[in-house]
Image (cartoon, grey):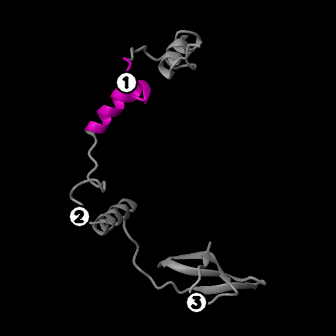
Amino acid sequence: MNRLDRREALALLGATTLNAQAPAPSGMPPDLPRTLAPSQSGTGTLFAEMEQLARRADFPDSFLNPRWTSIEDHRREGRRIALEALGSEPPRVEPRAEIVHREETADFIREKIVFSTAPELRVPAYLHLPRRRTGRVPAIVD
């Protein structure tokens, strides 16, 4: 039994119905044909383009960059970059959490709270506290 590899199967399929040019959507010109040279990669015919993009790309903030001497430095700089991308940081405020509703069940206490995250912004949340607990335990805030 002759077995086709992926490239041969795609070439065979390309020579049949898939090679027929589909009509372009109304108002759109058809794509221009282009020849694609086979490559020896597992990514098919996109390897050359991907390799070219990888060579052009510079990833100065990657942890693989030799400028990072510790994970702590990388995390600190990553946080700074992320906050900068989000825009200006609002002024810090006291949370001033208020319980606006409390519900008790057999297994947990559920409190609806509101708290401040910015001077003009109050956020609602539910706090689920387990009843049977000793020491530190996880809590769910949603």
Indicate whether 50 appears above or below 5.
Answer: below
- Secondary structure, mark 3, is loop
Residue 128 placement, left or right of 120: right
- Looking at the image, can residue 21 be seen? no
Q: What residue type is labelled 1?
A: Gln
Q: Spatial distance from mark 2 to mark 1, Cα to Cα?
A: 37 Å
Q: What stretch is highlighted in magenta?
A: 37-55
- Majority secondary structure of magenta residues: helix
- Secondary structure, mark 1, is loop
User: To which residue does mark 2 refer?
Assistant: 69
Q: Which mark is residue 123?
A: none
Q: Report the quarter where the N terminus lies.
A: top right
Which residue is painted at 29% across and 32% down in the image?
52
Q: Spatial distance from mark 3 to mark 1, Cα to Cα?
A: 59 Å
The residue nearer to you, when weighing 52 against 29, is: 52
Question: Which residue is outermost to the front?
Answer: 1
Asked if the residues shown at circle 3 and circle 1 are in contact, with their CB atoms under 8 angstroms apart, the answer is: no
Where in the figure is residue 60, as x and y percent of width and height? Answer: 26, 52
Where in the figure is residue 33, as x and y percent of width and height? Answer: 43, 13
User: To which residue does mark 1 refer?
Assistant: 40
Q: Spatial distance from mark 3 to mark 2, Cα to Cα?
A: 37 Å
Q: Which of marks 3 and 2 is nearer the N terminus?
A: 2
User: To which residue does mark 3 refer?
Assistant: 135
Q: How crowded is mark 2: few (under 14 residues within 10 Å), some or many (20 or more)?
A: few
Q: Which amino acid does label 3 sit on?
A: Gly
